Image (cartoon, rainbow, N blue to C red):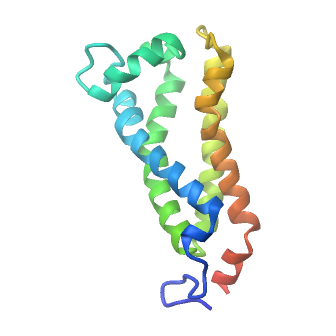
Amino acid sequence: MPDALGGSIDMKPLYRRPLDCALVTFFSITVLYGLLFSLPEGLGVPVAPDSPWPPLRALHGWAVAEEPAHLDPPPNLIAALLFDGFFQAPALIFVILGLARLRPWVKPLGLFYSGAAVTNMFFYFTQTFLGPHPPPNIAYYLAFNLPWLIAPLALGLRVLLAEDLRRAAS
């Protein structure tokens, strides 16, 4: 039964929905990463050992070892970074709230976000693997980057197929 805000009164608490807990946790980390790392880098703060922004100083070692494109980002990487900071982080705040409270509006938002995020990762991986500096250790690279492809796919499937969101909407 829906409440006054469109949520489900008889919904399971978040802690009893393991997939939602995992998505909320991962997307919370993604929001922080987008605001602390991606947005400043996309706005031109350098990834360097003497970067004026401490998180990007910390990222320098990873960039040298695994993703050298971050040392001199090409335009499509800058676009992906700006996507992370200006679209993904704010959208995920609402996705997190919608999932936590099982709001029916999370379905269209989740589907739109999922499509945009998967497309963004396609271009990100294309730059990484087909650009001038592919990662030297593909397994290590993928272990740290595939979650940003898998989580949006999981969200899209979750909101598309979820019975609890259909019940919340009716």
Number of labels in the image equals 0
Name the quadrant of the C terminus.
Answer: bottom right
Compare residues 79 and 3 and report the one nearer the observer.
3
Compare residues 153 and 144 and report the one nearer the observer.
144
Q: Residue furthest right?
A: 161
Q: Is residue 143 left or right of residue 51?
A: right
Q: Is residue 152 left or right of residue 46?
A: right
Q: Is residue 122 left or right of residue 79?
A: right
Counting from the top left corner in percent of width and height, residue 21 is at 57, 60
Counting from the top left corner in percent of width and height, residue 25 is at 51, 53
For the point 38% across and 33% down, the residue is 37
Q: Is residue 13 visible?
A: yes
Compare residues 139 and 51 and report the one nearer the observer.
139
50 w.r.t. 75: above or below: above
Counting from the top left corner in percent of width and height, residue 163 is at 74, 75
- Location of residue 159 (image quadrant): bottom right
Counting from the top left corner in percent of width and height, residue 63 is at 46, 16
Q: Is residue 72 visible?
A: no
For the point 61% across and 19% down, the residue is 128
Name the quadrant of the N terminus.
Answer: bottom right
- Location of residue 118 (image quadrant): top right
24 w.r.t. 11: above or below: above
Q: Residue furthest front?
A: 16
